[in-house]
Image: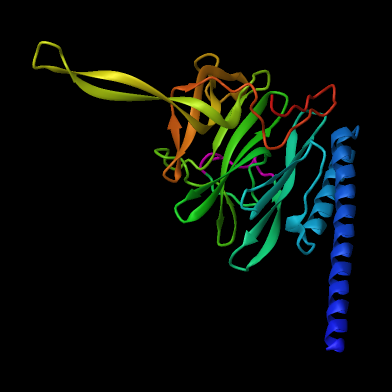
Amino acid sequence: MTRKIILLALLTTLTFSIEAQNKERMQAHQARLKALIERVASAPTDNERYLASEEAVGVLAAALAEEESERWQWQLPNYASVLTSPDKLFRIFTWAVVRDDGEFECFGAVQFYNDKEEEYQYQLLHDKSEEIMNREESLLTADRWFGAVYQEIIQTQMGDRTLYTLLGWNGVDNLTERKIIEPVILRGGVPQFGAAAFRRERNIRRIVLEYTNDAMVNLSYEMQTIQDVQHERVKVKGTNRYRTVEKIKERKERVIMFDEVEPQVPGMEGLFQYYVPSGVELAYAFVDGKWELRNGAQGRLKDKKLNKPFEPIDKAAPSYNFNR
């Protein structure tokens, strides 16, 4: 009995020692990553910013390879985004490097539970957004990713699959910016970026809003007033005839709100530096396993918040603004 007690005590001590060592390693990874992200934001030259970002990718990869790293509560500067799904099975890290010519390139990694392998794994993200031709229709992977810095993660159920919908932003260049709605599913145990999650929008697997960088375009997940237009047949008083009337009913619903964008003048279609908000607000509501487009969304909440706050990088030119 005494030997069993001693053995149990030794095992307990060993477990605590391993956990302490793992915590120390994760703290060291976090401290280094934090310093590198700050360097990405503040370094004076393209070369220094890219070197810092590349090293940050390596540090992040080393951290995600640590045992039980999925449990680590990351604290990073607001120039980087760390979003974790409510079910804790999906986490994504993103940030951007802004070059002196105003162009952006996004970096990061995705950590996920591979139910095929029954373990947490990670993949590094490679921004190929400028090479992707059919950007709203393409099925993509971590190696061929439509880069963005994500600001919101929404978890829903699409049939027997869990759907993670990401809302993101990309500064693009000196002419345009993008807001992106990116559905992600785990197919074969690994992330697939883009999914047929939009009702009545055949072949559309993500929504990309690109517009002049002087415009302010909203994209957020929030509680809003939705107007449902219903048509009813009513009897005309004093006759046997009927007529159809419209009735508008309002209700509160959590939706993805966004501004419709369009060219300022006809003939500029596809030249996104001339796209501005049309003045129409649209919304996607999640209904029966799909995002369904709704008209009649009203206003915005003044106190709406993102999962992750963002701060602008202090650079005179080009500006590096999140959540404009």
Tell me if residue 2 comes above or below residue 181 in the rendering: below
Give the residue at x 45% y 43%.
290
The N terminus lies in quadrant? bottom right
Tell me if residue 93 comes above or below residue 66 in the rendering: above
Give the residue at x 32% y 20%.
247
Tell me if residue 77 comes above or below residue 320 in the rendering: below
Q: Is residue 239 magenta?
A: no
**In the rendering, at what x and y percent does residue 226 appear?**
45, 26
- Tell me if 188 is positioned left or right of 305 in this view: left
Q: Which residues are magenta?
A: 127-137
- Tell me if 58 is positioned left or right of 209 in this view: right
Within the image, what quadrant is residue 306 found in? top right
Tell me if residue 189 comes above or below residue 268 in the rendering: below
Observer-nearest of 117 and 124: 117
Give the residue at x 57% y 34%.
208
- Tell me if 99 is positioned left or right of 243 in this view: right
**In the rendering, at what x and y percent does residue 21 appear?**
89, 64
